Amino acid sequence: MAHSVSNDNKLSTLQLEFLKSLKYMATEKQLQDIKSLVRHYFALQLDNAIEKVETEKDYTAAIYESWLKTNLADAKTSDS
């Protein structure tokens, strides 16, 4: 029985093209390679987004260290 897809759950053109390309995979190794590529792609996207925010807000290592110290001090206080 074929499943219909409601308007709320339609696949995008990108998703459909990706699914079409999967028909050429023949081995488990190929599947693992594709998963690795997709993870790498999204990791790069995340790194770029973080770098953009850091640049826009002028975040530095010193700011992160300050936040870490504050959170650690708060954690010690709440443990007492």
Image: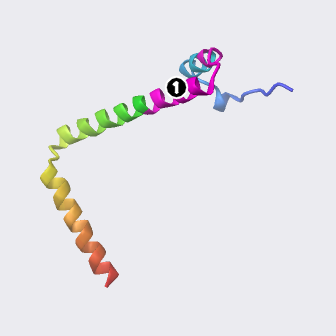
Amino acid type of disc 1? Answer: Ile
- Answer above or below: position of 74 versus 14: below
Label 1 SS = helix
Other residues around mark 1 within 10 Å, as few (<14) / some (14–19) / many (≥20): some
Looking at the rendering, which quadrant does residue 67 occupy? bottom left
Rendered view: 64 above or below 49: below
Instruction: Identify the residue at horizontal 65%, vertical 31% (top origin).
Output: 9
Which residue sits at x=25%, y=69%?
A: 72
Residue at 62% over, 20% down = 19
Snapshot colouring: rainbow
Farthest residue to the right: give it.
Answer: 1
Q: The C terminus is located in which quarter?
A: bottom left
Question: In the rendering, at what x and y percent does residue 11 appear?
Answer: 62, 25
User: From the viewer's perspective, is 45 left or right of 29?
Assistant: left
Q: Position of residue 26 (x, y in %)?
A: 65, 19
Where residue 14 appears, x then y in whole percent? 53, 19
Look at the image and say whether residue 62 sits in the magenta stretch: no
Quadrant location of the N terminus in the rendered image: top right
Q: Is residue 23 magenta?
A: yes
**Number of labelled discs?**
1
The residue drawn where x is 46% and y is 27% is: 37
Task: Please state the horizontal and vertical placement of residue 40, each as a whole percent of the image.
Answer: 41, 31
Instruction: Provide the residue designation for mark 1.
Output: 34
- Residue 16 falls left or right of residue 1: left
Residue range corresponding to the magenta coloring: 21-39
Magenta stretch: dominant secondary structure: helix
46 relative to 25, above or below: below
